[in-house]
Image (cartoon, rainbow, N blue to C red):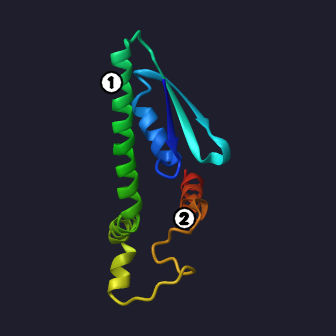
Amino acid sequence: MDINLNSKIYPLEVILNACYIFIDRAYIFLDSGPKGESTRVSLKPKNRASQKQLEILKGEFTNELLHSALRYTVSKNNKKIREYIIGRALCSSLPASELVSSGAKLDYVEDPLGIAIPWEEKYGKKKKNAQSKV
C-alpha cells in the first residue's frame, strides 16, 4: 500500500517520526519524488492483513502523520523559549552566578575556582612529597 505525501505539508522529519511509530506493525519503504517535491511511503504489514485491515493501517498512519506534524510545529515554535528555560536553569545552578549577582567582574582568563589548574600541579606534588617522607 503506497501513500504519496507532499513534502511542503509533511517535512521529512515528520514522515520519519510517523514511520518510527509503525515499525513494529509494518515494513516501511520511503522513496522521494522528482525534485524532492513528494515522498512515497510504502507500508507492508508484517502479518497477513485483509483489505479492511490495510485501510485501517493506512488511516492510523495518516493520523500519526498529523500528530507528528503538530508536534513538529509546536516544537519549532517553542524552540526559543525552551532554549531560554534550559539556559536559565543551567546558569542558575553555577556557583559563578553568585559572583555575577554580587557585582564581581568575571573574566575568562581568571580562574577563581582553580578549575584550570592541571591535576599534576594541584595534586601531584603532594603525592611526591608523601612518597619521599616514607
Nearest the viewer among 77 and 82 is 77
Q: Position of residue 51 (x, y in %)?
A: 38, 15
Give the mark nearest the N terminus, 2 or 1: 1
Q: Toward which corner of the image does residue 95 lie, by quadrant? A: bottom left
Mark 1: few, some, or many residues within 10 Å (few <14, many ≥20)?
A: few
Residue lying at 56% horizontally and 68% vertically, measured from the top left: 117
What number is the disc on residue 15?
Answer: none
Q: Position of residue 93 (x, y in %)?
A: 33, 67
Residue lying at 41% horizontally and 23% vertically, measured from the top left: 24
Residue lying at 57% horizontally and 80% vertically, measured from the top left: 109
From this viewpoint, which residue is outermost toward the top? Answer: 48
Can you say whether 81 is above or below 58 in the image? below
Task: Classify mark 1: helix, strand or loop.
Answer: helix
Can you say whether 99 is above or below 48 in the image? below
Which residue position is annotated with label 2?
122
Q: Position of residue 27 (x, y in %)?
A: 49, 22
Q: Toward which corner of the image does residue 81 lie, by quadrant? A: bottom left
Q: Is residue 95 left or right of residue 11?
A: left
Amino acid type, residue under disc 2 in the picture: Lys
Can you say whether 9 is above or below 24 in the image? below
Mark 2: few, some, or many residues within 10 Å (few <14, many ≥20)?
A: few
Which residue position is annotated with label 1?
56
Nearest the viewer among 3 and 116 is 3
Task: Classify mark 2: helix, strand or loop.
Answer: helix
Q: How far is the residue under mark 2 from the one under mark 1?
A: 67 Å
Amino acid type, residue under disc 1 in the picture: Ile
Q: Toward which corner of the image does residue 113 lie, by quadrant? A: bottom left
Q: Is residue 36 left or right of residue 6?
A: right
Residue lying at 67% horizontally and 48% vertically, measured from the top left: 35
Nearest the viewer among 83 and 4 is 4
Nearest the viewer among 94 and 58 is 58
